[in-house]
Image (spheres, coloured by chain):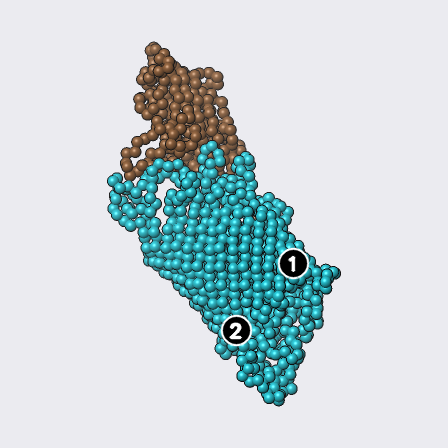
Amino acid sequence: MRRARMLLVLALCACGGTGGELVTFHAAAAGPADSVSGQPFVFTNALGYQVTLTRARLHIGGVYLNRSVPSSGSQATSCVLPGIYSGQVTSPLDVDVISPDAQPFPADGEGTTDRSQTGEIWLFGTAVDATDDRTVLADVAGTAVQGTGTPIEFTGKFTIGQNRAVPVGNPALPGSSPLCKQRIVTPISVDFALAQGGTLLVRVDPRAWFRNVDFAQIAADPDNPAQRKFLDRSQGQPDLAFYGGLRAASGTYLFNWQSP
Amino acid sequence: MEMSLHKPTTRRAARHLVLALAAAQLAAPTRATAQAQAQAQEDLRPPQVVQRSEAIYPPAALAERREASVTLEVTVDTSGRVGDPKVFESGGKEFDDAAMAAVSQWAFTPAEESGKPVAARIRIPFAFRLPPLPPPELATPPGPPATARPPAQGEAGAEHPAVETPAKQEGEELEATVRGRARPRSRGASDYDVTVGQLSLVPRKTAAELLKLAPGILLSNEGGEGHANQVFLRGFDAREGQDVEFSVAGVPANQVGNPHGNGYADLNFIIPEVVSSLRVLEGPYDPRQGNFAVAGSAEYELGFEERGVGLQVGYGSYATRRVLALWGPPGSSSRTFGAAEFYETDGFGKNRDATRGSAIGQYEGHLGETTYRLTLQGYSARWHSAGVIREDDLGAGRKAFFDTYDFGQGGNATRFSVSGEIESRSGSVVYRNQVFAILSGARSRENTTGFLLDVQDPQQTLHTQRGDLIDQSTSATTAGIRGFARTSLDAFGRRHEAELGYFARYDVTDGTQYRIEAATNAPYHVDLDLHSQVADIGIYGDLSLNPLSWLTLRGGARLDLFTFDILNRCAVQSVAHPSLTNPPLDASCLDQESFGAHREPVQPATTSSMAFLPRVSALVTPVAHLTFSGSYGKGVRSIDPQFITQDVKTPFASARSIDLGASYTRDLAGTALALRTGVFETKVDKDLIFSESAGRNVLGGSSTRRGLLAAARLTGGFLDESLNVTLVRATFDDTGLLIPYVPDLVVRSDTSVWRRLPWSPGGVPLVASTGVGVTFVGRRPLPFGDRSDRIVTVDASVSLARRPVRLALTATNLLDAQYRLGEFNYASDFHSQPAPTLVPVRHFTAGAPRQLMLTLEVLLGGGS
């Protein structure tokens, strides 16, 4: 009788679940772990330049996680695929990426306990689908020297607006290359499940931005001819190489999940 | 003589269980027949009743809240004695026996022909009814003075609720009216014949809220006043009626092909004051139940007890105004009435204003043994709605509790219908035929996701998110007929009953769904554009067998044929290789499929399918007052026309349900007690699950619901209490996970108390009354393992009546609890944060705050 009563209670009680869980988590961003706080960040790129970064800041509009498996062409259809997201950090953050210190986002992230397999870095200032956006997303300064050559002092401010618009190749597909695709860095491979109270640390490695930059081709700064300056445009080796590094889905951004 | 049989005296009301009260209406021939005969044969005088005895309501029938009509034929001999009684129309053995026992006590003055006593053979109909008790309204304060009518014979000491007999005065002409409609037989513990009665004192904004008097029902409304209520029934999220078959005076209320949901049932056109009774059958157990009766069915019957002309004027919180005109011509039955309502409110919080007007008229007449009924109805409404609020926006102070994101949300609705019904008798066979026609239109604009779904497609010109406001419109014409023939059978020494019936309905519906651009309020995309012609032809057979005195078997089967002729005007929405020279770009309904090859954007599809629906019940009454019952049945919901494919058989969603229950009823010192409990299991092969992106329920997998319910009703001379509790566990069959949003615990209490005050200003009694309704809803499961908050609301009213005036103050959400009527977990982006919000979070719709309303009623003329 007692067992029957227990079974009845179990069968009817307000127990059981619908699967999954909603969670909030802490989120932060930082530079490479091997950088030194307060010190310039020194590295050598693929073209043999020794680069000393004295300033490297990145404006992150948002961070997202989704459940889809990264694959080539998976983002070919649209920027946003409602229903696949498992985590988000929607408060923007300016990150000093030559500091290894975790710099928290202004607000916690939200998500579900579904397994996340893809990370996304959204680089925008006003809106991810804005037709133009002059917000400086990457702000860099430093020097580069190749062998015993003359050090090249450079600066650069990078935006993603009409300067990054991709011309429409097929008139029947005028919406195939929206700017939001330029602003979303994906698919970044991740493999973890969020948990309540954990911490997501996004490490940004500025070495990847400069990996293929030929500093010698950077144009002189019209306002200060002694310096060179990235022109923030979609042409020229330095700009294209930097922009390629900024948007690289591998090597630039590392998602590190720390369970509570 | 139209007898006011539903107005118990104070003494009677106090001493009797007025749970089941009825009219045994003395009839020679019917009124019209008697009058015709009187005119033709002035020298013929029918027998006159001088002594009568009430029939005792059969306890088992009372427990199951069953009603019946019995007509006896008796001979009144030259000395006025009753003899040779025979059952002319059976209401079932127990009712027949009760009527026979009563009539044997009757005495008459004999009929006379040319002044000489003669023997006469007459018919006496007994109507065993569970009518609504008179609300303590102005014309019928509960407990009218004992002198209102003389007590019936045999009243004192009655243990059971008695069938009330007309207060016939000696010398009055004999005449009678057969009242009411032949009612279907009870299917057991899950069959609720809800008597509103004094519980009309409990505040209810709409007639839909009367459903709460049956266990397991929770109503919600996220769409604003005027939008159909969302119905949760015994573990089903039936949305706006997709899983519950609704009818009003026999006219279907579910809309076929409504893009908001196939089966959408807007009950706001019903004026609550003219609802006389409500049958809620929880489960598909009656062969009369048709399409959409997956979770069950609800049948509203219309009537207005008062006679005269009445006016109600109310004013309340948030500039809410209501005017209601009601009339019932004296001398006519309660089923002849007219009612018109106007309602307007600014609404609480933002964007919740509403306006509606409704009119319902019904006439019931008699021609010989034929009763005919004409019902006319018109309704129009417009409203705005606030929609959902994100919990994180509320917490961060970005939005207020009663706020809104999108002021474009709202809707409008119209419904006009006409119904004609004839019920007649030939020998022992009762026939009924009904024809109805409905013109209806509805528009609903809802935005549940903000700016999430309008992704950039390659074929579209570049755009930002234009907004997810869904604009759904329906225009429908419905015509249909239904009817039955019922007869009694004598076999094995017992009386049984058989019924054959039919139902035919044809719907022509145009349904569209657009997406509206927030910046311009213009449609930017067509989701759906359907022209549907849907026919449903059903036949059923139903037997009621009484093989043993303590056993009744009921059941039969139903066969439904559904045919669909659908024209999808926007069938092609994607082109694989658009033409370079003539690309479709932003058009939704495309005329090419690949490489520019022309193809019309439309797609016709026709198909049909049949559903066979067996349904059986067994009722066992081992001892007086106690009945056990078991039921099994299968129900179906036809599929939304947008899912129809050419020549592919209509994929019905079907439910198989089983119930076991017990009921107990007892008359205890003038107080009626009715208890009922049961367990049930329902399996559905294609469930409906809410989709926030589609803005409605969409097809899901199979699911199972198990639960128990208990209900109690206590009715006395100054108190009416209804309490019900339902526990349900609803799970998906594949995962075993709970079905989101379905409440697993619902408790509802309705209490009315009324009392005649010791003062009688001007000699007119003063009656005070109060009604309280309490709802408790347990924590509902939400997606992602979450649970909603509990809901506890209290509604109350107080009123003071002194004929012909009544003043009432009602309060809904009396305690002013700030509660979330609906809670949802899903992704939305209302542009309330710097970056798009794409992961599921908690949303809610705000429950209404405390609202007061003062209503003045005046009822003039008529009498009762």
As helix, strand or loop, the secondary structure at mark 2 comes to strand
Q: Amino acid at mark 2?
A: His
The residue carrying mark 1 is: B806
Badge 1 density bin: few <14, some 14–19, many ≥20, Cα 10 Å: many
The residue at the point 50 percent across, 69 percent down is B373
Characterize the local packing of mark 2: few (<14), some (14-19) or many (20 or more) Cα atoms within 10 angstroms.
some
Where's residue A178, x and y in %?
35, 34
Q: Quadrant of residue B177?
A: bottom right
- B154 relative to B85 in the view: left or right: right
Chain for disc number 1: B
Q: Nearer the viewer, residue A101 or B250?
A: B250
User: Where is the N terminus of chain B found, in terms of image quarters?
Assistant: bottom right
| Looking at the image, residue B460 lies above or below residue B123 | above
Q: Is residue B570 above or below residue B831?
A: below
Coordinates of residue B29 in the picture (x, y in percent): 55, 79
Q: Which color has been applied to chain B in this rendered view? A: cyan
Which quarter of the figure is the C terminus of chain B placed in? bottom right
For the question of whether residue B366 can be seen, the reply is yes
Q: Which residue is mark 2?
A: B366
Task: Say the numbered circle drawn on residue B222.
Answer: none
> Depth-wise, is mark 1 or mark 2 nearer the camera?
1
Q: Amino acid at mark 1?
A: Arg
Would you identify the image quadrant in which residue A214 lies?
top left
Tell whether B259 sits left or right of B861. left
Q: Nearer the viewer, residue B35 or B295?
A: B35
Left or right: B636 as drawn, with respect to B50: left
The residue most toward the right is B758
Residue at left 30%, top 33%?
Answer: A168
Mark earlier in primary sequence (1, 2): 2
